[in-house]
Image (cartoon, helix red, strand yellow):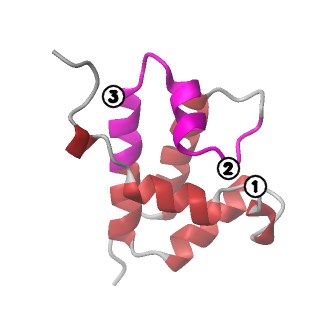
Amino acid sequence: MPSGPPPHLDSYPYLEHLLGAYLNSDYTIYGPEPKDAVAAYARDEDWLDAAAARADIRRFLAFHHNDLDAELVRRFPDHARDAKTGALDFLNWLDATLASCHSGPQS
């Protein structure tokens, strides 16, 4: 039996968009800190997209917990992360930051 998640669950399109379009090596176009790029994502994207990105993060953590650092670099080579910060801490920070930026639909 093959190891790892089924192919249809091993896709992270919302996380890929967040890391590829906002939280990449050019994140400073949004401000000096990575949190500025996440705030720009939160302003630009629908709250449902942010919720889907958080779901992608949780699924990524669940499926790749044995080799998070290598898998994050393999899949998202241009993501912005301090070299001293492990993938687990980075993804948990990203999830919490998204949660604080998007609490649901705004009336």
Disc 1: which residue: 25
x and y percentages locating residue 95 in the rendered image: 48, 46
Q: Is residue 48 left or right of residue 21?
A: left
Instruction: Please report the bounds of the magenta region as a residue range.
Output: 55-82
Tag shown at residue 92: none
Placement of 33 over or under 92, stated as above or below:
below
- Specify few, some or many for label 1: CA neighbours under 10 Å numbering under 14, 14-19, or 20 or more: some
Residue position for label 2: 78
Q: Does 7 lie within the magenta span?
A: no
Place of residue 73 in the rendered image (x, y in percent of width and height, measured from the top left): 60, 36
Label 3 with label 1: CB-CB less than 8 Å: no
- Front residue of 79 and 101: 79
Contact, CB < 8 Å: mark 2 with mark 1?
Answer: yes
Q: Is residue 56 left or right of residue 32?
A: left
Specify the quadrant that holds the N terminus: top left
- Distance Cα–Cα, label 3 vs label 2: 21 Å
* Residue at image location 56% in from the left, 36% down from the top: 74
Which of discs 3 and 2 lies nearer the camera? The answer is 2
Indicate whether 75 appears above or below 48. above
Q: CA distance from mark 2 to mark 1?
A: 6 Å
The mark that comes first in sequence, 3 or 1, is 1
Residue at x-position 33% and y-position 28%? 63
At x 55% / y 46%, what residue is drawn?
94
Q: Secondary structure at mark 2?
A: loop
Residue type pointed to by label 2: Asp
* Mark 3–mark 1 distance (CA, rounded to whole Å): 25 Å
Which residue is identified by label 3?
Answer: 63
Q: Is residue 77 above or below residue 3?
A: below
The type of residue carrying mark 3 is Phe
